[in-house]
Image (cartoon, helix red, strand yellow):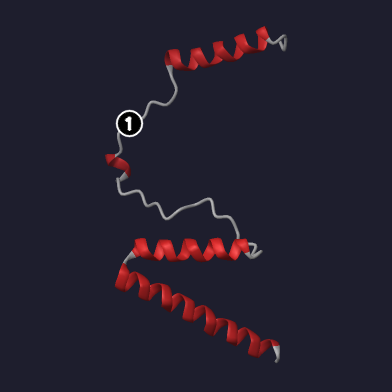
Amino acid sequence: MSNREHSDDGAAEVREWVEAIESVIAFEGTDRADLVLSSAVDAARRNGAKLPFAANSAYVNTIAPDEEPAHPGVTGNRAQGTFATTRNMSVSSGAA
């Protein structure tokens, strides 16, 4: 089998998998699709597949930026307390 035939077979197989998961979503919902995909990924990993790690998720921020509440960050006593704790730890351990 040539490389061309092999890649075409792979493309058809990928299309079949994508169509199958789209069907699960259409008829059974995304929760079921999540379960099916998680199970398939677990099985693949158990059998030695090296699947890439993805640190990002399907999370979509539904709050418009201008509607987000203000967030002051670390200010005032909290910031000073963190420094004081860190400084005290280094002094007590003899690291300073």
User: In the image, is residue 93 above or below residue 63?
Assistant: above
Tell me if 68 is positioned left or right of 91 in this view. Answer: left
User: Quadrant of the rendered structure where residue 43 is?
Assistant: bottom right
Quarter of the image containing the N terminus?
Answer: bottom right
Residue sitting at x 58%, y 55%: 53
Left of 72 or right of it: where is 43?
Answer: right
Q: Could you classify mark 1 by the number of other residues whose Cα lies within 10 Å: few (under 14), some (14-19), or many (20 or more)?
A: few
Question: Where does the C terminus fall, quadrant-wise?
Answer: top right
- The foreground one among 22 and 78 is 22
> Which of 8/17 is in front?
17
Q: How many numbered discs?
A: 1
Q: Where is residue 64 in the image (x, y as percent from the top left)?
A: 30, 46
Q: On the image, which quarter does residue 47 sit in? A: bottom right
Observer-nearest of 77 and 65: 77
Q: Whole-percent x and y of residue 61?
A: 35, 48
Q: Which residue is drawn at 44% across and 12% down?
A: 77
Residue 36 locus on image (x, y percent): 44, 66
Which residue is disc 1 drawn over?
A: 70
Q: What residue type is labelled 1?
A: Ala
Who's the residue at 42% across and 72% down the image?
Answer: 21
Q: Helix or strand or loop: what does disc 1 sit on?
A: loop
The picture places residue 66, in percent across and down from the top left corner, at 29, 41
75 is higher (above) or lower (below) than 50: above
Tell me: 92 left or right of 22: right
User: Which residue is painted at 41% across and 61% down in the image?
Assistant: 34
Point out the residue furthest to the left here: 67
